[in-house]
């Protein structure tokens, strides 16, 4: 005997099966998983429909399909922490870091901070948002009110200046060679 939920599912969801399969084929790289993906999606939709019927079932179907694919991709990126066998013990422990190594790390960090401080203001801001805060290029552009192309240019320039500062020989004092803000601005503009 068909329930109201079954009728809704057949008339509002299953009628889009052909379009759904085309959508999944276009967006899911693993062809062998398409039928499992479709069945898992149907199970989710049926459970959701039992709680409340969506106002736009077709849109709900495709939005749910996108969410399911995203969930599967995210799960695929999870790395297992289970031990894979016997490993030789590591001889590098945090507590065993020599004072020289610790000091060298602090000096490298200080050189990086100095090099960042010497970047032109906008360039520094773009590099910080993109590389430190890990915002997408699009997010950086919208936050700063500039084009994505401008973000690309600032990132390229900033990374070049930082690399020059960190990996060049520097002057007699050991300070990294980074142009002043005025000289660096003239390069980009």
Image (tube, helix red, strand yellow):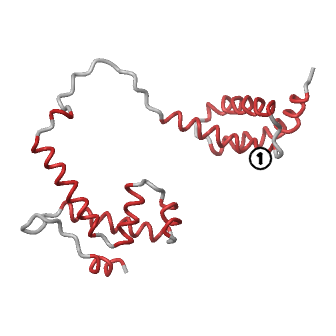
Residue 13, given in percent of the width and then of the height, sits at 82, 37
Crowding at label 1, few (<14), some or many (≥20) Cα neighbours within 10 Å?
A: few
Residue 71 lies in quadrant: top right
x 48%, y 63%: residue: 140
Horizontal arrangement in the rendering, residue 36 relative to residue 95 (left or right): right
- Foreground: 88 or 4? 4
Residue that lies at the very extreme toward the top in this rendered image: 86
Horizontal arrangement in the rendering, residue 175 relative to residue 44 (left or right): left
Residue 165, given in percent of the width and then of the height, sits at 21, 64
Which residue carries the number 1 mark? 59
Instruction: State whether residue 154 is above or below residue 39.
Output: below
Q: Which quadrant: the N terminus?
A: top right
Residue that lies at the very extreme toward the left in this rendered image: 172
Q: Which quadrant: the C terminus?
A: bottom left
Residue 20 lies in quadrant: top right
Count the marks: how many?
1
x 35%, y 72%: residue: 121
x 22%, y 70%: residue: 178
Q: Secondary structure at mark 1?
A: helix
Residue 118, given in percent of the width and then of the height, sits at 26, 70
Horizontal arrangement in the rendering, residue 10 relative to residue 170 (left or right): right
Horizontal arrangement in the rendering, residue 25 relative to residue 145 (left or right): right
Residue 95 lies in quadrant: top left
Residue 174, given in percent of the width and then of the height, sits at 10, 63
x 43%, y 31%: residue: 79
């Amino acid at each position: 005997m068909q329930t109201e939920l079954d009728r809704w599912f057949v008339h509002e969801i299953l009628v889009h099966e052909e379009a759904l399969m085309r959508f999944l084929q276009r967006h899911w790289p693993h062809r062998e998983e398409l039928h499992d993906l479709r069945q898992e999606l149907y199970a989710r939709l049926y459970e959701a429909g039992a709680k409340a019927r969506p106002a736009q079932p077709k849109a709900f179907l495709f939005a749910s399909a996108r969410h399911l694919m995203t969930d599967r991709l995210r799960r695929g990126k999870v790395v297992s922490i289970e031990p894979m066998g016997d490993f030789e013990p590591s001889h590098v422990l945090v507590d065993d870091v020599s004072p020289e190594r610790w000091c060298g790390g602090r000096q490298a960090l200080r050189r990086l901070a100095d090099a960042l401080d010497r970047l032109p203001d906008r360039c520094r801001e773009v590099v910080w948002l993109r590389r430190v805060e890990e915002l997408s290029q699009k997010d950086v552009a919208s936050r700063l009110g500039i084009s994505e192309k401008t973000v690309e240019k600032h990132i390229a320039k900033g990374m070049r200046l930082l690399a020059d500062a960190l990996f060049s020989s520097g002057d007699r004092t050991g300070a990294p060679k980074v142009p002043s803000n005025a000289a660096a601005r003239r390069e980009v503009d």
